[in-house]
Image (tube, helix red, strand yellow):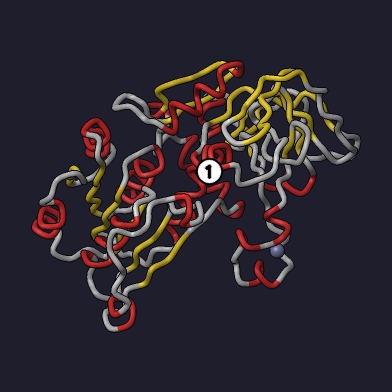
Amino acid sequence: MQGVVYRGPQDLRLETLPVPQIQSGELLVKVAVCGVCPTDIKKIHYGTVPPPRVFGHETAGTVVKMGARARGFSVGDRVALHHHVPCLKCHFCHHRAFAQCAGYKRTGITAGFEPAGGGYAEYVRVMPFVLPGVVKIPARNTFAEGAMLEPVNTVLKAVKRLSLLRGDSVLVAGQGPIGLMFTKILSLRGIKVVATDLLESRLKLAVKWGARHAFNAAKASLAGDIRAAYPILDAAVIAVPSDAAVVQAMELVRGSAQVLLFAHTSPAKNHPAPQLALDFSRVCLEEKDLIGSYSADFTLQEETAGLVFSRRLDIRPLITHTFPLSQTAAAIVLASHPTPESFKILVAQ
Ligand SMILES: [Zn+2]
Ligand SMILES: [Zn+2]
């Protein structure tokens, strides 16, 4: 089969690989679609993990082979994959800190080499411990909708970390595919969203997706504009890896509000130093919480599937570019340098 192998920083190669061998409790899935995700882009760009690997974890495809003891699926099922499932037994899991569980950190889907998702290959092997997160795609829905369950799940998990009441106001900084999902999911919950981004095309889409106001983050008047429209901000979601946006949000939100980091997924050495220092009295005296959310929660898969497959959250307009497997490297370049026209980018076979 063909697969796109990460051979080192910025080095992706289309190679011929053996079709993965499955064991008795496993599935072999023929990949139809894989979303290009910023966390993979960072690993490829900065070489934060050792090569070789086949990345791609927003994957949907068709079950083509089942191990003798694999249950719950049939050959021919169209499925959305899920690559991390926690053990539910360890200290971290008892605290629902699933993303910190050692079992969760194991990737259960591979196209060969050290498991890393494998979606940028023709076939993947799905291990038994991630099967509880695998969802069948209804006949009326597309593979692309299936592939979007993973990112939508990460957003839903983060939204549930916010203590919000209907009618509250939330700033969502960054209106890329993830920021737009926040805008939509918060709006569906009766939250007033104020959206910011540097690209006008993204601000327009944010309003279409439910934002009450959208402001260009490049404008010097940004803080004043937000304050005028929303004197009380109950939370902020920082869906862009900007330290300045975090510091500004900590100033803008009301006392006892939450500021949630969603895009600061690489160590500080890989992004610019803060332009401003954070005043810690905002945390102590003003009781503002600075929190983070990372990765998905498989216990939210059913709710996520309901949102996406019912099209209450219709992700189809987000998908602007689809590349063939042989052009995965170009797909990743476009995703890491978005244009006014580009939102979610897929690799499809
Ligand atoms: Zn992802
Ligand atoms: Zn655990």
User: Against 213, is 282 above or below?
Assistant: below
Task: Report whether residue 34 is seen.
Answer: yes
Q: Quadrant of ligand 2?
A: bottom right
Left or right: 83 in relation to 286: right
Task: Report whether residue 305 is seen.
Answer: no
Left or right: 221 in relation to 73: left
Q: Considering the numbered disc 1 on the image, is that residue within a helix, a strand or a loop? A: helix
Left or right: 167 in relation to 149: left
- For residue 98, which quarter of the picture? bottom right
Which quadrant would the N terminus be assigned to in this image?
top right
Left or right: 310 in relation to 107: left
Q: Nearer the viewer, residue 53 or 83?
A: 53
Which quadrant would the C terminus be assigned to in this image?
top right
Mark 1 sits near ligand 1, with its Cβ under 8 Å away? yes
Q: Nearer the viewer, residue 232 or 199?
A: 199
Q: Percent position (x, y) of residue 329?
A: 55, 24
User: Against 163, is 219 above or below?
Assistant: above
Q: Percent position (x, y) of residue 323?
A: 52, 18
User: Which residue, given by chain and number where applicable, does mark 1 sit on?
Assistant: 39
Q: Residue extending furthest bottom?
A: 285
